[in-house]
Amino acid sequence: MDSLPPAAASYVHNVAEATQTPTDLAATCALGTLATLAMWNNATIDLDTWTEPGNLYLVCVLGTGEGKSPTMKWMCEPIHTMAGRMVTDNAALLSRQIALRKQAQARHKQAERALDKNPDDPDTLVDEQATRDALDLIPEQGTPTYILDDVTPEAMIEAIRDNGGHLTVLSSEPGIFDQTSRYQQAGTPPNIELMLKAWSGEGVNLRRVGRGVTTLDSPSINMMLMAQPVAISRIYGNTEMRERGLAPRLMMCHPATLVGHRQTINRPTIQNNLKEAWEALCQDVNIRMGAHPTTILTPGIDLARFVWDEWRKNLETRIGSTGDLHHIAGFMAKIISSTARTCLLLHHAWGHTGPIEPDTMHRAIQLGDYWIGHLCSEIAATGTDQPDRRAAQAVLNWAARHDMDSFTIRELR
């Protein structure tokens, strides 16, 4: 909580008390909201040797019925309001583009019919090619949907294209991960390529059945999801999710449950002044990021740089063969990236416009250490740090899927 600016921290406390949920949940939603604004403004942090965008993949782990949905609703309301405004503001432009594409399609069809009648006419051939080129210059465009809930990888492609290259996924359920395997044939890997590359904005060519290849030059996805403990265990226990790098991209928190200790009567209510202060902060951050999209971590002799370098140096030692974090070494690069991105978000949230300040870096590292602690706890609980246990779990899952009380060595092989 110390990492968040006062307007955010106060509202997080208020929402947590009103919904009787852990502050971790509301704070995660606050970070996800700020990350959405960073993505919309193409905000980045320049670390001298590499650059990080501002989007994050956040997951908060809580059981069913613990107030995830209302907390997300209250904390994310500012970006829903802004998204609705963007759709309204772009309605006229969208209508114009759709009309132009329809006109170009009609001209191209007319040229195709003329070419069918006179295939040897050079003028007709030139006209057909010209109308084809004109059509290609006007991309297919649907109504933007900047924020989605339950979405398939295929639908994400359409949404990112229509939104101008980005998409925010906000959901009180982790169904997006189940969707990655829903239409896959047995034995084929989950469809996670888009989510892997949209983490850092890598271009991707995606082939869709019946629709050919769709090219996304620099896709970006920001995710803020809630998950039950069994779901997160399934994600971390999935070899494809873990080894291909989707699980390491998830910055996960698993707060202690408040069930059994919640205030059932005379609950605090949402205070309008705190809500308005949070909305005003989001508006200010949006404006600030638009005006100063690139933030610099000063190279050379600088206190913020020194804090950053020392933290990374310490982590490198800890993930060594004798270090206490060796079992999550594969996760560490993404935690470091997410911490840098969080530094960008906090930099703007605290009202700064120049280079990164030492206090901002300390706050971001505090969150990075928080994620490391929760990841270690979750890995230990699921046993995914133990290869033998992972193998045993895979056998158990296989037997359960096939409703087997027993099996032979041949079946196991």
Image (spheres, helix red, strand yellow):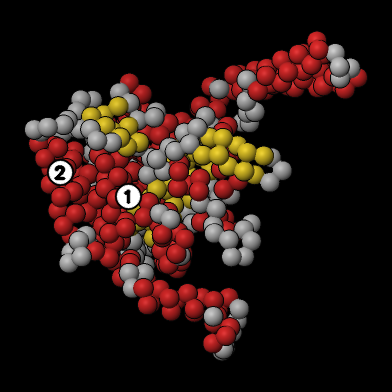
Rendered location of residue 258, percent (x, y): 33, 64
Q: Is residue 394 visible?
A: yes
Residue at image point 28% right, 36% down? 50
Q: How many marks?
A: 2
370 vs 2, nearest the viewer: 370
Residue at image point 46% right, 30% down? 82
Q: Is residue 282 visible?
A: no
Instruction: Judge from the rendering whether residue 255 lies leftward or rightward of residue 411; answer left or right.
Output: left
266 vs 306, nearest the viewer: 306
Compared with residue 258, is residue 57 higher up or lower down, i.e. above or below? above
Residue projecting furthest to the top:
123
* Badge 1 amino acid: Lys
Q: How dense is the environment of label 1, judged by Cα within 10 Å: few (below 14), some, or many (20 and up)?
A: some
Rendered location of residue 170, percent (x, y): 47, 46
Instruction: Judge from the rendering whether residue 354 lies leftward or rightward of residue 108; answer left or right.
Output: left
Q: CA distance from mark 1 to mark 2?
A: 16 Å
Compared with residue 16, is residue 255 higher up or lower down, i.e. above or below? below
Compared with residue 280, is residue 99 higher up or lower down, i.e. above or below? above
Q: Determine whether the residue tagged by mark 2 lies in a helix, strand or loop.
A: helix
- The residue that disc 2 covers is 309
* Badge 2 amino acid: Asp
- The residue that disc 1 covers is 334
Residue at image point 47% right, 60% down? 240
Rendered location of residue 66, percent (x, y): 42, 61
324 vs 91, nearest the viewer: 324
Q: Split into 4 quadrants, where in the image is the C terminus?
A: bottom right
